[in-house]
Image (cartoon, coloured by chain):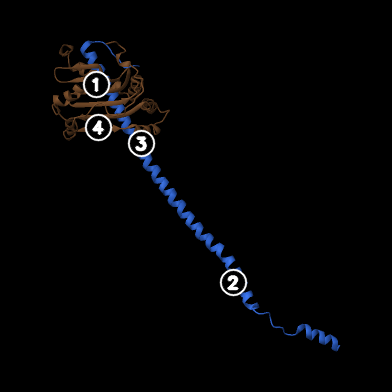
Amino acid sequence: MSRLEDELRQALRRREPPAGFAERVMARARAREREQRRPRWLGWRWLAAATAVVVVAAGLHFMEERRRRLEGERAKEQVMLALELTGAKLILAEQRVQQVIGFSLALPN
Amino acid sequence: MRKSGLALMILAAVPLAAQQIKFPPALDKLAAKAKETANVNLDASTLGLASKFMSGEKGEESAAKKLVGGLKSIHVRSFKFEKEGEYSAADVSSIREQLRGAQWACIVSVQKKDGESADVCLYREGEATTGLAVLAAEPKELTVVNIVGTLSLEALGSLTRQLGIAEQLKKGLAETKKAVPPAEKDE
């Protein structure tokens, strides 16, 4: 009985931790906490930045496309106007010739 | 002039896109007197852009797209006035003189005593035809067109039909004929 008690006492006796044990535990705990926090925090930040970049780029692209489309439509209108005027004046010239010399010169049908 | 005179196909490479007629400064000043002005200056890149926005299937746009493909530039000045006599003979003659240059061949040139005139001229570079000029002077209207590049008048004729210009003008001419007896023809 006394031997058993001695063994138990020996096993359960208070022992001092090795030097720097508490610091190492705290450092490891902090490191783990940082590892857990940083990616999530940085992830949101990068996601927000990337979203902003995409939104701005899409906006600029949309504005550029809109400007280009307006320019194209305007150019098309001018071309149609120019060709319409040219066609009209060619027909007018043809009609003047008809009036003067009495035969048809006719634009192709 | 033969019946097919205006039905020429102008098919040639175009080395230059520069305007072939110099519009005199006096011409642009007419805008102040005009009730309607059309001022068009389109270079090759703008024509290319316009072409991209033309439908290849829609009638008139399809015809215009075919035309524009061979063009290098388009220059138009057109003025409509409230009353007669707003432009001078000098305004017209300064352009017509340019069309008498060696490189121009006029396929139509009609001048009436009242000052009305119509000129259709082709610009030649060697054997190639690389431009078209139209000068139309009417009592209340003056139009100068210079199209630089390969232009098919056949395609232009097709476009004018699609736009219904011929019908409108024929209607106008028929009304004129009713009002003006044939004896009043000047030339």
Query: Are the two marked residues, 3 and 4, in contact with CB atoms closer than 8 angstroms?
Result: no
Question: Is residue A55 visible from the viewing direction of this image?
Answer: yes
User: Amino acid type of disc 1?
Assistant: Gly
User: Amino acid type of disc 2?
Assistant: Arg
Q: Earlier in the sequence, mark 4 or mark 1?
A: 4
Chain label for disc 2: A
**Which chain is painted in brown?**
B
Query: Could you say where residue B154 lies in the image, as x and y percent from the top left?
Result: 35, 19
Chain label for disc 3: A
Query: Are the two marked residues, 2 and 1, in contact with CB atoms closer than 8 angstroms?
Result: no
Query: Are the two marked residues, 4 and 1, in contact with CB atoms closer than 8 angstroms?
Result: no
Give residue A73's mark.
3
User: Amino acid type of disc 3?
Assistant: Glu
Query: Is residue B58 left or right of B22 when viewed as pictured?
Result: right
Chain label for disc 1: B
The shade of chain A is blue
The residue to which callout 4 is attached is: B38
Query: Is residue B64 left or right of A89 when viewed as pictured?
Result: right
* Real-space CA distance between mark 3 and mark 4, rounded to the nearest whole angstrom: 17 Å
The residue to which callout 2 is attached is: A30
